[in-house]
Amino acid sequence: MPIDSRLPNFRSLSPAQRIDHLTTLLKLSDQDQQLLRNAGALPLEIADGMIENVVGKFELPYAIATNFLVNGRDVLVPLVVEEPSVVAAASYMAKLARAAGGFRTSSSAPLMRAQVQIVGVTDPYGARQRLLRSKDEIIALANSKDTLLLQLGGGCRDIEIHTFEQSAVGPMLVMHLIVDVRDAMGANTVNTMAETVAPLVEKVSGGKVRLRILSNLADLRLARAEARFTPETFDTAELKGKDVIDGIIEAYTFAAIDPYRAATHNKGIMNGIDPLVVATGNDWRAIEAGAHAYASRNGHYGSLTTWEKDKQGHLVGTIEMPMSLGLVGGATKTHPMAQVSLRILDVKSAQELAEIAVAVGLAQNLGALRALATEGIQRGHMALHARNIAMQAGAVGEEVDWVVKQMVQARDVRTERAGALLNERRNK
């Protein structure tokens, strides 16, 4: 059933009221409602089975980013993050994107790489030829270990041989198994395949197999998003939209040419992507590793996004990056809240989830660039950060909003100032 992701006045509701609203909108089950209302949604016994040496649980805020329209479908996006401004910025940029149709996305097939390292070869190019001639036998052996994946339409598709004629340990070959992992992240699948073919690879190559492990540079498993904005979208009382667009493009260009800026620029993109990855129980470290390696693919660390103007003077933003997300296996299936997240997203495939993730990353990037090109990053960020400061000073209930308003108006957001304001209010 289609939904409207705009959720007007959602921010002004209490957490309990927000859950009530989502329950009505999404027809959440009683179990899902209880998981959202219960801060301890992950039982300790499940946590103990997920990792080693468990002694407790560490919780982060779980929020909903609104306004997302992805390929014509309204999407509510669950985000798990501690940093103020992330959810607000992503939601607001998604609202601006709706005027021109929201986000348009695409993705490549869910292909992952398993690397098989081969050392001790005296004729690396000859060994490469022998392995390529044995490709069909290697692929058949790899697929023999996962008949279910084959039934689902996946499986090992091809091999690549990377030749390193010289290294610190002599000539080296690295064989890549190219595997369609369908709706899995794929680490266990490709690692098992790599280990399965190792004896055959040794026999054919005449070398010794060492490492057999996936690569998190999933450059064959890409997700893309694009959004377009008219100049009028960015009009403010102080600035014309076309000038804001010029500022955004100049800020992007800075990141494209300077790795020091690119690191912070891309961190802002991941501010949107990582919280969704965490909310769905996926491996955010793998996504981070792949993202930053991909940003360096041309021998220079640069931006994961591009921002440019079309012939009409509209701002056009695009993103393309590796996105190895899964709907099955691991914490995605184990963690109760990961399952709630997937039901909220209502995604049917890992590729659809990946496309939503990069759309959120593009929105988050625009939020940062727009702020930098206009009032500066601190104004909006500190207004939200002020809530944390007020609460640290002991403010509760209505006191929080009052203390925040006073600090932001005075542009003085400090714990000492929050404490003084709180004492002033209480003494009155």
Image (tube, helix red, strand yellow):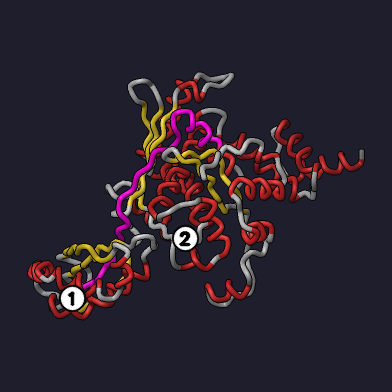
Q: Which mark is residue 201?
A: 1
Residue at left offset 63%, top offset 61%:
31
Residue at left offset 18%, top offset 72%:
138
In the figure, is residue 293 to the left or right of 65? left
In the figure, is residue 63 to the left or right of 364? right
Disc 2 is placed on an element classified as loop
- 116 in magenta: yes
Residue at left offset 48%, top offset 28%:
99
| CB within 8 Å, label 2 to label 1 | no
Inspect this view and state whether residue 302 appears.
no
Q: Which residue is mark 2?
A: 282
Inspect this view and state whether residue 185 appears.
yes
User: Between 207 and 312, which is closer to the camera in this rendering?
Assistant: 312
In the figure, is residue 426 to the left or right of 312? right
Residue at left offset 51%, top offset 50%:
345
Mark 1 Cα shell of 10 Å, populated few (<14), some (14-19), many (≥20): many
**Separation of residues labelled 2 and 1 (CA atoms):** 32 Å
User: Between 184 and 312, which is closer to the camera in this rendering?
Assistant: 184
Tell me the quarter of the image containing the C terminus: top right
- In the rendered view, would you say 186 is above or below 242? below
Disc 1 is placed on an element classified as helix
First of labels 2, 1 by sequence position = 1
Mark 2 Cα shell of 10 Å, populated few (<14), some (14-19), many (≥20): many
Residue 421 point in image, percent of width and height:
81, 40
The residue stretch that appears in magenta? 92-119
User: Between 406 and 181, which is closer to the camera in this rendering?
Assistant: 181
Q: Where, by quadrant of the figure, is residue 348 drawn?
A: bottom left
In the figure, is residue 257 to the left or right of 127? right
- 163 in magenta: no
Amino acid type at circle 1 is: Val
User: Between 391 and 300, which is closer to the camera in this rendering?
Assistant: 391
Tag nearer the camera, 2 or 1: 2
